[in-house]
């Protein structure tokens, strides 16, 4: 009869593998994403590390533009300019929906 060595192995010899969660809470320190040429890559990396991601920076700009659009005089705008503002408003609204859906 085979001897059982229970002290040598864990109780469960299985592991749940979910490839959709491989990068959850992962840290990619030291990895640089190059999205094009930069005039000053060191400054750009420092801004991303110390100030915020591109998405966060764009989000702040979008928030500020919404305030400006709310208070600006639109009476002298052309139809094309009004359409551009309307498109931006719709995009910012869609971003808010996605952020809300994802708990941000």
Image (cartoon, rainbow, N blue to C red):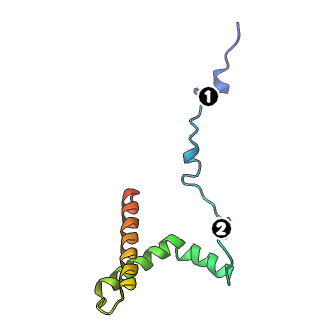
Can you tell which quarter of the image residue 70 is in? bottom left
The numbered disc on residue 13 is: 1
Residue 104 in sight: no
30 left or right, relative to 51:
right
| Secondary structure category for the residue under label 2 | loop
Q: Residue at 29% of width from left, 87% of height from top?
A: 71
| Secondary structure category for the residue under label 1 | loop
Furthest toward the bottom, the residue is 76
Q: Earlier in the sequence, mark 1 or mark 2?
A: 1
Q: Residue at 60% of width from left, 30% of height from top?
A: 14
Q: Position of residue 2 (x, y in %)?
A: 71, 10
Can you tell which quarter of the image residue 87 is in? bottom left
Furthest toward the top, the residue is 1
Is residue 99 depicted above or below 76 in this figure? Answer: above
Is residue 14 depicted above or below 89 in this figure? Answer: above
Q: Nearer the viewer, mark 1 or mark 2?
A: 2
Is residue 104 depicted above or below 64 in this figure? Answer: above
* Label 1: how many Cα within 10 Å (few below 14, some 14–19, many 20+): few
Q: Position of residue 39 (x, y in %)?
A: 68, 84
Can you tell which quarter of the image residue 29 is in? bottom right
Q: Residue at 41% of width from left, 66% of height from top?
A: 95
Front residue of 1 and 33? 33
Q: Label 2: which residue?
A: 33
Front residue of 15 and 98? 98
* Label 2: how many Cα within 10 Å (few below 14, some 14–19, many 20+): few
Distance of mark 1 from mark 2, alpha carbons?
38 Å
Front residue of 71 and 28? 71
């Amino acid at each position: 009869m085979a001897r059982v060595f229970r002290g040598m192995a864990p109780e469960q010899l299985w592991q749940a593998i979910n490839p959709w969660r491989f990068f959850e809470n992962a840290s990619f320190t030291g990895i640089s994403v190059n999205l094009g040429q930069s005039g000053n890559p060191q400054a750009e990396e420092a801004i991303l590390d110390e100030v915020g991601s591109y998405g966060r920076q764009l989000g702040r700009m979008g928030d500020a533009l919404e305030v400006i659009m709310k208070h600006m005089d639109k009476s002298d705008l052309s139809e094309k300019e009004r359409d551009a503002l309307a498109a931006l408003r719709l995009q910012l609204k869609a971003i808010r929906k996605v952020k809300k859906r994802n708990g941000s």
